[in-house]
């Protein structure tokens, strides 16, 4: 603890967060390469171990090897721990150990926690983290029991318990990993699985601040603007995604056509929820129509909400830009949601996030088109899945060259940390300017 605080005096919070994730990925890579992590007779190449560790720590779910047949119990547990650390954040988990050991949380630690969960202030940050940890482990535990009971009729009881724990952690942290080999396509029409898995994914993707707000709603009887926006846009995106999938895939014999009406509704809803950042599926993504795949690219690029276990540009960023467009068309000077005005600096931040993310996305697609022999839309889909840390795949990732794997690995890391956090970590120390340039007029449109 003292060593970490000593180092923190010379490093900015964004740089510490970047370094922390790099450390987790490095340790995970080394552990996955050990013989005790792999099935007998299986050898994992360094690039595949790095890819898998990054995908787990960045809670993405893209894979280049089959998790169930490549890794033994120890290797799978390593992946599960990486998902838990990556989903909740290493600073959140470090706070958990500090609280258990009765250690004092310093001001620098609180600043790091604020940065890690995208909170707007340090006030009550430790209390929020404590509640989030309780909520997270509780919902994971309850879901693990439900899933274990579901699978106990299909496999030995101990295996069902282990599967329940692994997939509960994977779904809540939007990890996207599964031990079945074809995600959850056997459970397309199982309402118990669909409801349980959807609650896990949605809860993990709402964000820690929103979870705390919902946790205290009974006492305060009101929600913050952040929570109202997140809940509104998340619900709208899930609903729109489910409707689009239902319409476009209704007659597709490879996805929804052969299913009953109930199964069609379950599959459409779950797949729309999955694009928030979960990366799991109950239908064959590779067989979806190109129009549906392209729409999924848009949903994956938006991703989950700030301070959550998911990636993407975030739902609130997307909503602020929509609000800006609406305000401009209506001739309003301010962006207003729920009778509250959005500060101008948030608009600039949202615009920066979108432009930087879009630029990285386009560069990644162009590089993949250079290194890989695959259709344009398929490579765009994988790139969007990586930068949104979603994990949905159209079957291209496991066939990529080593250069393609390196590109996707970097993209997953940027998507989880956030382009602005990495930019803040690498920028030189800011010097305050004592002047402003004169205003100039430019014709646009």
Image (cartoon, rainbow, N blue to C red):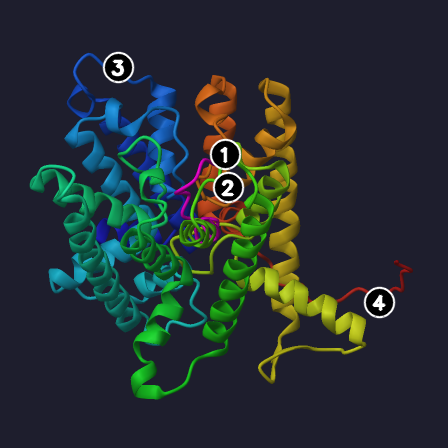
Please provide percent x and percent y for residue 386.
Answer: 49, 38
The residue stretch that appears in magenta: 271-285
- Is there CB contact under 8 Å for labels 1 and 4? no
Identify the mark at residue 52; answer none if there is no mark. Answer: none
Q: Residue 376 vs residue 110: left or right?
A: right
Residue under label 1: 254
Q: CA distance from mark 3 to mark 2?
A: 41 Å
Please provide percent x and percent y for residue 49.
Answer: 33, 25
Q: Residue at x 24, y 62 (%)?
A: 133
Identify the mark at residue 43; answer none if there is no mark. Answer: 3
Mark earlier in primary sequence (4, 2):
2
62 is higher (above) or lower (below) than 338: above
Q: CA distance from mark 1 to mark 4?
A: 58 Å
Q: Residue at x 80, y 71 (%)?
A: 329
Q: Secondary structure at mark 3?
A: loop
Is 408 in front, or is 41?
41
**In this rendering, which labeled residue sits more in front, label 3 or label 4?**
3
Q: Taking the image as drawn, is residue 428 in sight?
A: no
Q: CA distance from mark 3 to mark 1?
A: 35 Å
Residue under label 4: 439
- Considering every residue shown, the one lying at the far top of the view is 41
Q: Residues within 10 Å of mark 2 (few under 14, many from 20)?
A: some
Please provide percent x and percent y for residue 137.
Answer: 21, 59
- Is there CB contact under 8 Å for labels 2 and 1? yes
Is 199 in front, or is 429?
199
């Amino acid at each position: 603890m003292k060593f970490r605080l000593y180092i923190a005096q010379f490093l900015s919070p964004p740089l510490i967060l970047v370094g922390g994730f790099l450390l987790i990925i490095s340790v995970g890579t080394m552990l996955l390469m050990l013989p005790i992590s792999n099935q007998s007779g299986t050898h994992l190449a360094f690039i595949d171990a790095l890819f898998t560790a990054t995908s787990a720590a960045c809670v993405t779910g893209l894979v280049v090897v089959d998790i169930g047949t490549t890794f033994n119990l120890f290797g799978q547990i390593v992946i599960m721990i990486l998902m838990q650390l990556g989903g909740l954040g290493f600073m959140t988990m470090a706070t958990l150990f500090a609280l258990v050991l009765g250690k004092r949380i310093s001001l620098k630690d609180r600043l790091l926690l604020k940065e890690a969960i995208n909170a707007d202030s340090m006030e009550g940050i430790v209390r929020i983290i404590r509640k989030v940890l309780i909520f997270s482990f509780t919902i994971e535990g309850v879901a693990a029991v439900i899933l274990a009971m579901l699978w106990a009729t299909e496999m030995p009881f101990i295996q069902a318990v282990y599967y329940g724990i692994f997939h509960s952690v994977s779904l809540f942290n939007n990890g996207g990993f599964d031990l079945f080999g074809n995600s959850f396509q056997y459970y397309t029409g199982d309402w118990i699985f669909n409801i349980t898995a959807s609650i896990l994914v949605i809860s993990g993707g709402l964000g820690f601040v929103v979870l705390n707000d919902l946790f205290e709603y009974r006492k305060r009887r009101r929600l913050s603007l952040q929570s109202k926006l997140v809940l509104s846009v998340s619900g709208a995106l899930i609903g729109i995604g489910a409707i689009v999938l239902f319409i476009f895939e209704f007659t597709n014999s490879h996805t929804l056509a052969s299913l009953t009406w109930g199964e069609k509704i379950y599959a459409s809803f779950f797949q729309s929820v999955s694009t928030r950042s979960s990366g799991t599926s109950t239908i064959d993504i590779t067989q979806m129509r190109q129009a549906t795949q392209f729409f999924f690219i848009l949903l994956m690029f938006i991703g989950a909400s700030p301070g959550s276990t998911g990636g993407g540009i975030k739902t609130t960023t997307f909503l602020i830009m929509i609000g800006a467009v609406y305000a401009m068309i209506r001739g309003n000077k301010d962006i207003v949601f729920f009778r509250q005005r959005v500060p101008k600096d948030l608009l600039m931040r949202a615009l920066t996030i979108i432009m930087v993310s879009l630029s990285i996305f386009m560069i990644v697609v162009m590089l993949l088109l250079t290194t890989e022999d695959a259709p344009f839309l398929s490579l765009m889909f994988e790139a969007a899945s990586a930068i949104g840390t979603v994990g949905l795949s159209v079957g291209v990732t496991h066939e990529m060259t080593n250069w393609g794997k390196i590109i996707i690995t970097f993209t997953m890391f940027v998507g989880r940390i956030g382009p602005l956090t990495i930019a803040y970590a690498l920028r030189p120390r800011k010097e305050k300017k004592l002047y402003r340039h004169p205003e100039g007029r430019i014709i646009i449109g």
